[in-house]
Image: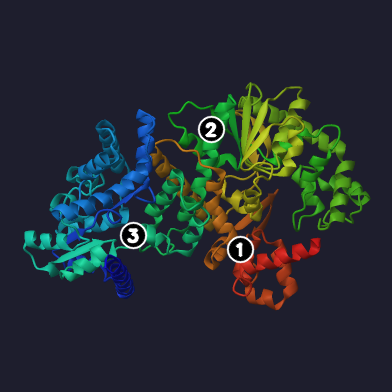
């Protein structure tokens, strides 16, 4: 008989759930402001409606409480989070059976824990106090809903708050006041009134107390059954505000991002997701209006935060005397380093003007070695012999004979093929004396600049850059040897590739954050999948440094022309603003618990999702971004993933193939132009089969 009752109850519950799902699908919100205008009393649910938490799941509060307790008072001999989660439904079930109450308060929940698990009263009191304090700190206003609350106040509406919640009324009132909800008629709290929305009795209580027709009330909430169905049963008008978490994971790209993490998120990951959701997914009317700001907030901020936190720890551990952030990739890094370490005792830092060209050319002495030749002969489309000589301030008209002797017809010959590159290398070799003369002049100015910024005199220094190959650090080492000065420099980079190992063997210590000498491979694959987007993320508002000049004010850098379109400049400004705002918001949450170290995997996961699994819309938006290379007065620009037109490209397979191999973001290119014909998973499967066949 008991078994049959349980089975019936289970079937009944399933039928009810399906009915609710059907009603939910059919339910349509009216215009929010019109509904407010037509109502006299506006009832707001509190949690996940006007107030959101700084963690993804409410139970994460209990994890934080436990850690704070351990930090303050020492270890616990029981699993607090597990017990606290079980205690609320257990205690409610017992109380309902004994006295018929529908909702408990926090004191009763902790009394149940104490009596059932035989925990000392002093420990119980400390845990309860910490839970209240943590809830107060981790509750923030929903900016989007606060605007509607303010609209109600400005238009003379009677505002009430209605919540099924166990926290004391004084605590809820403080949370509301602290978050800008200071003016309201009354707070209707289940733990005080002992009636709940989930049973519908709290709405009956409100109607009786206010003595008003149900149609004069508009109730707004996130729990469809309790806030919408039960309110509608009483004749109250409703507005369904979908829980921000639920709304966020309805978005394909955000759901795909969550799948990159373990099911059980760490607290820093929980805070990351909550920070993103509270900023981006509480809104309901943006429709990509803040695309680039959101890009900075969701994808870039966590990379900067993780990298600079890792960097700061390294600098302190290694007792570095001064850190130099190399232009141009170090521009925002330096900004974030100063932001994150305000009021902290950390090694001093400086933004150092540098570039591969500005550092490498001055190291040429007596002979042009392989690494210098590689820089001098790096192929850029449509550049002539004249342009390459002009780049290091050599007048091609004075070297016509040597140009012809190297195998060129004239100075306007373009460098296109590997053979052209070999001829160009031969030309530079024949101009070794002239190149060394220029190098000597540039070396003097560079040396004076490095002395000016205390680079040479510091005992132990670090250079910070985006990294990859470690060539700048190698050039600095060569410069030190030329000057007969030991420059004790360590390199800290966003990432390093395996090819950088050759510099380490020369005694140049370096390490990377996202990937260290191409490991872990998973992170390395993400980086090399679109190196240029990472470089775009670390943009600076000035051109690349050519060399240095001396004037009355000292030594200053000479820049290449930096001509960005208004659109590109606006995009950079927007995503950098989003980046800095994310860091500020995340650190504000850290102030309420503890400082967190962000793992490289957690930092790279968001951008990994974008680069390896973009939506069609993202493949267009980010594929339209351009990467520019400046050589003297010449600018070579390429899109990340864009061809002249999908149909014309598909009509000409050879043209399409050419565009594909020339593009900078191949996954984005495939998604944009052939994603509907050849899905990415199928492409990777075919590629894997081909690779397997080649090895068999």
Q: Position of residue 571 (x, y in %)?
A: 51, 55
Kindly state the secondary structure of the residue where label 1 is placed. Answer: helix
* Residue shown at 56% from the left, 62% from the top: 614
The tag on residue 243 is 3
Kindly state the secondary structure of the residue where label 3 is placed. Answer: loop
What colour scheme was applied to this rendering of the protein?
A: rainbow
Is the residue under label 2 in contact with that under label 1 (CB below 8 Å)?
no
Circle 1 residue: 668
Is the residue under label 3 in contact with that under label 2 (CB below 8 Å)?
no
The quadrant of the image that shows the N terminus is bottom left
Q: CA distance from mark 2 to mark 3?
A: 37 Å
Q: Residues within 10 Å of mark 2 (few under 14, many from 20)?
A: some
Q: Is residue 181 left or right of residue 331?
A: left
Circle 2 residue: 312
Q: CA distance from mark 1 to mark 2?
A: 34 Å
Q: CA distance from mark 3 to mark 1?
A: 32 Å
The disc, 3 or 1, on the residue closer to the chain's N-terminal end is 3
The quadrant of the image that shows the C terminus is bottom right
Whether residue 69 can be seen here: yes
The disc, 1 or 2, on the residue closer to the chain's N-terminal end is 2
Q: Is residue 344 left or right of residue 383?
A: left
Residue toward you, 323 or 448:
323
**Which residue appears farthest toward the front when viewing the image?**
1
Task: Name the image quarter holding residue 19.
Answer: bottom left
Is the residue under label 1 in contact with that under label 3 (CB below 8 Å)?
no
Q: Is residue 292 left or right of residue 52?
A: right
Task: Name the image quarter holding residue 367.
Answer: top right
Q: How many marks?
A: 3
Whether residue 569 can be seen here: no
């Amino acid at each position: 008989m008991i078994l049959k009752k349980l089975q019936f109850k289970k079937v009944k519950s399933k039928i009810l759930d399906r009915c609710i799902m059907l009603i939910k699908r059919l339910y349509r919100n009216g215009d929010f402001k019109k509904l407010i205008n037509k109502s006299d009393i506006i009832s707001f649910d509190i949690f996940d409606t006007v107030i959101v938490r700084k963690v993804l799941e409410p139970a994460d509060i209990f994890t934080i409480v436990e850690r704070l307790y351990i930090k303050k008072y020492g270890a616990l001999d029981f699993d607090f989070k597990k017990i606290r989660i079980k205690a609320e439904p257990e205690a409610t079930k017992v109380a309902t059976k004994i006295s018929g109450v529908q909702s408990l308060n926090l004191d009763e929940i902790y009394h149940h824990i104490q009596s059932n698990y035989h925990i000392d009263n002093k420990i119980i009191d400390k845990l309860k106090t910490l839970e209240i304090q943590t809830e107060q700190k981790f509750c923030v206003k929903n900016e989007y809903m606060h605007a509607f609350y303010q609209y109600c106040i400005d238009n003379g509406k009677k505002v009430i708050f209605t919540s099924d919640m166990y926290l004391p009324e004084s605590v809820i009132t403080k949370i509301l006041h602290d978050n800008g909800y200071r003016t309201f008629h009354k707070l209707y709290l289940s733990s005080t009134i002992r009636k709940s929305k989930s049973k519908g009795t709290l709405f009956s209580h409100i109607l009786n107390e206010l003595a008003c027709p149900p149609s004069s009330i508009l109730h707004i909430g996130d729990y469809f059954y309790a806030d919408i169905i039960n309110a509608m049963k009483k004749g109250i008008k409703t507005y369904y505000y979908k829980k921000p978490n639920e709304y966020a994971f309805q978005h394909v790209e955000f759901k795909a991002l969550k799948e990159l993490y373990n099911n059980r998120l760490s607290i820093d990951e929980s805070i990351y997701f909550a920070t993103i959701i509270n900023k981006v997914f509480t809104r309901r009317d943006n429709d990509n209006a803040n695309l680039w700001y959101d890009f900075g907030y969701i994808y870039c901020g966590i990379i900067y935060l993780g990298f600079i936190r890792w960097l700061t720890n390294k600098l302190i551990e290694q007792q570095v005397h001064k850190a130099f952030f190399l232009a141009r990739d170090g521009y925002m890094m330096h900004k974030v380093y100063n932001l994150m370490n305000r009021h902290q005792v950390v090694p001093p830092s400086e933004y150092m003007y540098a570039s591969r060209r500005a550092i490498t050319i001055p190291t040429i002495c007596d002979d042009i070695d392989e690494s210098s030749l590689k820089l001098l002969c790096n192929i850029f489309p449509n550049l002539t012999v004249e342009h390459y000589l002009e780049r290091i301030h050599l007048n091609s008209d004075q070297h016509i004979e040597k140009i012809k002797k190297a195998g060129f017809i004239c100075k306007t010959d373009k460098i296109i093929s590997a053979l052209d590159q070999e001829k160009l290398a031969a030309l530079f070799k024949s101009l070794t004396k002239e190149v060394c003369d220029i190098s000597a002049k540039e070396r003097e100015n560079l040396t004076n600049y490095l002395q000016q910024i205390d680079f040479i005199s510091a005992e132990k220094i670090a250079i910070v850059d985006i990294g990859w190959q470690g060539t700048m650090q190698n050039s600095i080492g060569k410069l030190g040897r030329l000057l007969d000065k030991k420059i004790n420099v360590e390199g800290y980079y966003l990432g390093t590739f395996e090819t950088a190992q050759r510099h380490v063997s020369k005694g140049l210590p370096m390490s990377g954050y996202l990937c260290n000498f191409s490991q872990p491979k998973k992170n390395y694959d993400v980086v090399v999948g679109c190196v240029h987007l990472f470089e775009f993320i670390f943009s600076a508002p000035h051109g690349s440094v050519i060399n240095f000049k001396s004037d009355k004010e000292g030594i200053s850098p000479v820049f290449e022309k930096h001509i960005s379109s208004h659109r590109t400049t606006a995009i950079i400004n927007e995503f950098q603003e989003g980046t800095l705002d994310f860091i500020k918001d995340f650190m504000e949450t850290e102030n309420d618990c503890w400082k967190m170290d962000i793992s490289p995997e957690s930092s790279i996961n968001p951008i990994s999702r974008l680069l390896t699994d973009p939506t069609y819309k993202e493949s267009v938006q980010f594929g339209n971004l351009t990467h520019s290379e400046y050589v003297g007065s010449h600018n070579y620009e390429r899109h990340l993933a864009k061809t002249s037109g999908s149909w014309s490209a598909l009509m000409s397979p050879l043209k399409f193939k050419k565009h594909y191999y020339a593009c900078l973001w191949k996954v984005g290119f495939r998604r944009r132009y052939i994603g509907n014909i050849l899905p990415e998973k199928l492409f990777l499967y075919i590629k894997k089969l081909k690779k397997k066949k080649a090895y068999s």
